[in-house]
Image (cartoon, grey):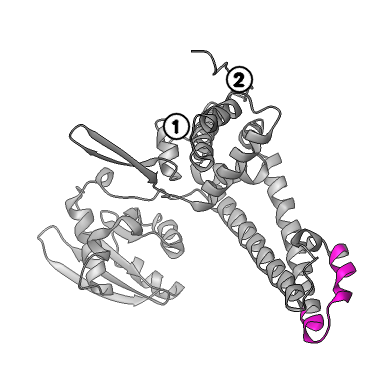
Amino acid sequence: MQGNGRWIGLDLSKRTYEMCYFDQKGKVGRSGGETTKGGRAKLYTKLKAEDIVAMEANSLAFVMEKEMRAIGCTVVILNASQLSVIYASTKKTDKEDALKLARLVKIYEKEDLPTVDVPTDKEYYRRKLIKEYKTLKGDRTQELNRLHALFVQCGITTIKRSNLQTDVNRQKVLAQLFDYEAGQAQRLCQRLTMLEVQIEELEQLIKKECKEDKGIQRLQTIPGVGDKTALAFAAYVGDGKRFNNGNEVANYVGLVPRVDCSGTINKYGHITKKGNKVVRALLYQAAWAIVRSKHGGALKAKYFYMTERGKGKKISITAIARKMAKLLYLVMKNKQMEYQEMPAPDLQAG
């Protein structure tokens, strides 16, 4: 990257950092310190507005990027999973990583690097909200599975997981357990109750966030798209301005197939699964919802057209999820647009 200052690589760990830089004369310099608030402040005194700083994407990198704005230096946050020059190296230390990061921003232009867009404060809040919600939902599922396993351990096979979804239903069947499993089940139920209260609190926060954003409300006009899917899409894709078209959005969330082209042979593999897995999982849920909806329209018809002609359900639903990602992008980018159901075409014709 062109610049009048230094090219700096910062390798961050939980407690310390390593800094390496190249100056305009090619001189290499190194330093290190702690990532505490005082340690970061000491680091910032060494930076200049002309410097270009590279870091791998993580939570601390986003914090430091925000703090460095006051200095005025250019900050580039790189996607760690695509930095093969670092992870394929046989010599991997913090100092070597910092050196390679500095070399990358010195040699390559920003558009040639696997950069990560820095979220706005609102997007960052929404990401944390969705992430915590998904984490708590996963914890609840694990606890329910443990509770169900206790009944099997006691030889009770008539109880299904569906019988344990609410506290009222759980209390009705707990009396069937005995010995140590009875006390263990009570403790599991206490944890489940606490998790469900926290999940309800987050659901209320998610609903509030959706009601206050007209863009999210437009996304919810699409059948199958609820609060969580709309909020997650807005959190990670934003207003859509940094994407040129819907294909880029589908690629961003990892719903495009891997392509291997050689000569006249084109091979298409499984989807890349790059990007945020939470958004991708919610898009799959939305795709299944629209397929089962009475108002699925053209997307529902496309799914059944594909399955009836030999495509597997997984491949077909992936195609619908990819279409939904593009549709969400169009509705989000066009601020005057709301979803209008397209009638299902006669796919039998021709």
Give whichever of discs 1 and 2 has the lower sequence position.
1
Question: At 30% from the left edge and 58% from the top edge, which residue is drawn?
Answer: 54
Q: Which residue is farthest top?
A: 350
Instruction: Decide: is 344 above or below 174.
Output: above
Q: Residue 176: within the magenta?
A: yes
| Alpha-carbon span between mark 1 and mark 2 | 21 Å
The residue where tag 1 is placed is: 246
Q: Which residue is farthest bottom?
A: 179
Res 269 → quadrant: top left
Q: Secondary structure at mark 1?
A: helix
Q: Residue 138: within the magenta?
A: no
Instruction: Give the dominant element type of the magenta stretch: helix, strand or loop.
Output: helix
Relative horizontal placement of residue 143, taking residue 183 as reference (left or right) = left
Residue 223: x and y, percent? 66, 32
Question: At 40% from the left edge and 70% from the top edge, which residue is drawn?
Answer: 41
| Of the pair 52 and 79, the residue shown nearer to us | 79
| Of the pair 319 and 275, the residue shown nearer to us | 319
The residue where tag 2 is placed is: 344
| Of the pair 4 and 218, the residue shown nearer to us | 218
Q: Is residue 221 visible?
A: yes
Res 283 → quadrant: top right
Instruction: Decide: is 36 above or below 122.
Output: below
Q: Residues within 10 Å of mark 2 (few under 14, many from 20)?
A: some
The amino acid marked with disc number 2 is Ala
Nearer to us of marks 1 and 2 is 2
| Of the pair 214 and 282, the residue shown nearer to us | 282
Relative horizontal placement of residue 67, taking residue 129 as reference (left or right) = left
